[in-house]
Amino acid sequence: MSSRLASAILLLGACATPAPIAESNLRGDYRHTENYLAWRVDRVVADNEITGISIALIDDQKVI
């Protein structure tokens, strides 16, 4: 029982992390967007027990 409780606390602690903050807003710099999407997708996948997902980030018909 205690290992389940420890696992639940660890899992909930990982889900409670804040969203990444942008360091700069330069046009064409997608580092923040990539970090945010990775953070957000991980949370949504875990919360909804999704086994797989595909995402494409596109800017002016160009895959980023």
Image (spheres, grey):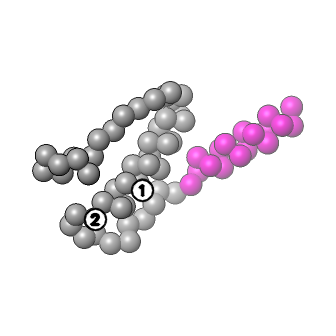
Horizontal and vertical percent position of residue 57:
27, 46
Amino acid at dot 2: Asp
Give the alpha-carbon distance from disc 1 to disc 2, as whole Å. Answer: 12 Å
Of labels 1 and 2, earlier in sequence is 2
- Numbered-mark total: 2
* Residue for point 75% across, 39% down: 7
Q: Quadrant of the N terminus?
A: top right
> Does residue 34 lie above or below 50 as drawn?
below
Assign a secondary structure to mark 2. loop
Residue beneath disc 2:
29
> Does residue 28 lie above or below 57 as drawn?
below
Assign a secondary structure to mark 1. helix
Q: Which mark is residue 14?
A: none
Number of residues whose C-alpha sits closer than 10 Å to that of mark 1, classed few (under 14), some (14–19) or many (20 or more) = some
State left or right for residue 11 relative to residue 19. right
Residue 21 is a magenta residue: no
Q: Which residues are magenta?
A: 1-17
Residue 11 is a magenta residue: yes
Horizontal and vertical percent position of residue 23:
38, 71
State left or right for residue 12 relative to residue 47. right
Amino acid at dot 1: Asn
Quarter location, residue 4: top right
Horizontal and vertical percent position of residue 51:
50, 27
Residue beneath disc 1:
35
State left or right for residue 44 relative to residue 56. right
Quarter location, residue 31: bottom left
Number of residues whose C-alpha sits closer than 10 Å to that of mark 2, classed few (under 14), some (14–19) or many (20 or more) = few
> Does residue 9 lie above or below 24 as drawn?
above
State the residue in front, 52 or 45. Answer: 52
